[in-house]
Image: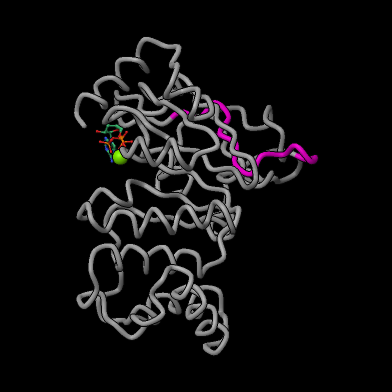
Amino acid sequence: MNASTYRASIEGPERPMVRFSGVTKRYGELTVLDGLDLDVSAGEMVTIIGPSGSGKTTVLRVLMTLENIDDGIIYVDGQPLTHMQKAGTLVPADARHLREMRAQIGMCFQHFNLFPHMTALGNCMEGPVYSLGMSKTEARERAVELLDMVGLADKRDHYPSQLSGGQQQRVAIARALAMRPKIMLFDEVTSALDPEVIGEVTNVIRKLVEEYKLTMLMVTHQMGFAKDISDRVCFFYGGKIEEQAPPEELFADPQRARTQQFLSAVKAAI
Ligand SMILES: Nc1ncnc2c1ncn2[C@@H]1O[C@H](COP(=O)(O)OP(=O)(O)OP(=O)(O)O)[C@@H](O)[C@H]1O
Ligand SMILES: [Mg+2]
């Protein structure tokens, strides 16, 4: 890639919070993201749906800088994520730049991976104290607030093993929010949960959309939830966006044959 051909930053009121511009990711011979273009505006909730292996998780992983990209560029809040400006050109980012950029993004996965030896409160304080250098008092206040927000005020002194799956996932969301990210990523956060507790978690995400107006990118297999909550739904196929539209349009009147096939297969499975 000739990095200098890309603009070093995106300015102006229309600047997206996240921009994927021609992003390609390969694993050996396999092209997993294929020149992906995707913008997410500040405060927007974008849901990614699509068949297994279409690159949904990879989109979130490259945005978290957990994976390198092979071509293209990703901007977060106008700044290049994996590159930085040096002498008027873009060069690959150093560790410090990556750390600063990564700090703007929070992520929750299917498996919550809480610290087992820490209480719910401890889990939510760890990052702010040790990564952000926040005082313990401030981190505690913030953690208490967030656990309250996710409906777990009475469980703050419980260890993960003393919490249900839905409760653990809510602690994981509170823990990610404790780092004050600008952007939250969710990857199938309800997939490992028993059906009766899924609503606890989706309600928290709903709250983040309605009250907190966080910028969010969510991968889900729950079409009903996607339809309900998203500003826009992107149907992924072969590492690209095959079709994207507001949910009421995409689910009611998909234009592309692959989207139609996928949605009718999903419907048949319910
Ligand atoms: N570390 C890796 N090494 C090699 N191939 C990988 C690696 N990670 C992912 N892949 C491949 O990349 C493709 C896309 O994977 P990804 O996890 O993004 O799919 P997905 O759309 O999230 O699927 P699912 O719905 O099953 O979670 C798959 O074919 C996968 O096997
Ligand atoms: Mg996945």
Q: What residue lies at 55% left-to-right and 45% top-to-bottom?
A: 82
Q: What residue lies at 43% left-to-right and 16% top-to-bottom?
A: 254
Using the rendered view, name the quadrant where residue 3 is placed: top right
Q: From the top left corner, tell me how far across and down residue 58 is, in percent.
A: 38, 38
Task: Name the foreground residue: 119 vs 162.
Answer: 162
The vertical placement of 5 against 242, above or below, is below
Residue at the bottom extreme, as displayed: 137
The vertical placement of 210 against 68, above or below, is below
- Can I make out residue 80 in this image? yes
Q: Seen in the image, is 11 located left or right of residue 214?
A: right
Q: What residue lies at 26% left-to-right and 80% top-to-bottom?
A: 159
Q: What residue lies at 45% left-to-right and 12% top-to-bottom?
A: 255
Q: Seen in the image, is 12 located left or right of residue 9?
A: right
The vertical placement of 25 against 83, above or below, is above
Using the rendered view, name the quadrant where residue 225 is placed: top left
Task: Name the foreground residue: 50 vs 25.
Answer: 50
* Range shown magenta: 11-24
- Can I make out residue 97 in this image? no
Q: Does the magenta stretch include residue 99?
A: no
Q: From the top left corner, tell me how far across and down residue 247 is, in percent.
A: 48, 30
Q: From the top left corner, tell me how far across and down residue 17 is, in percent.
A: 64, 44
Image quarter where the C terminus lies is top left
Image quarter where the N terminus lies is top right
Q: From the top left corner, tell me how far across and down residue 243 is, in percent.
A: 47, 20
Rendered-image quarter of ligand 2? top left
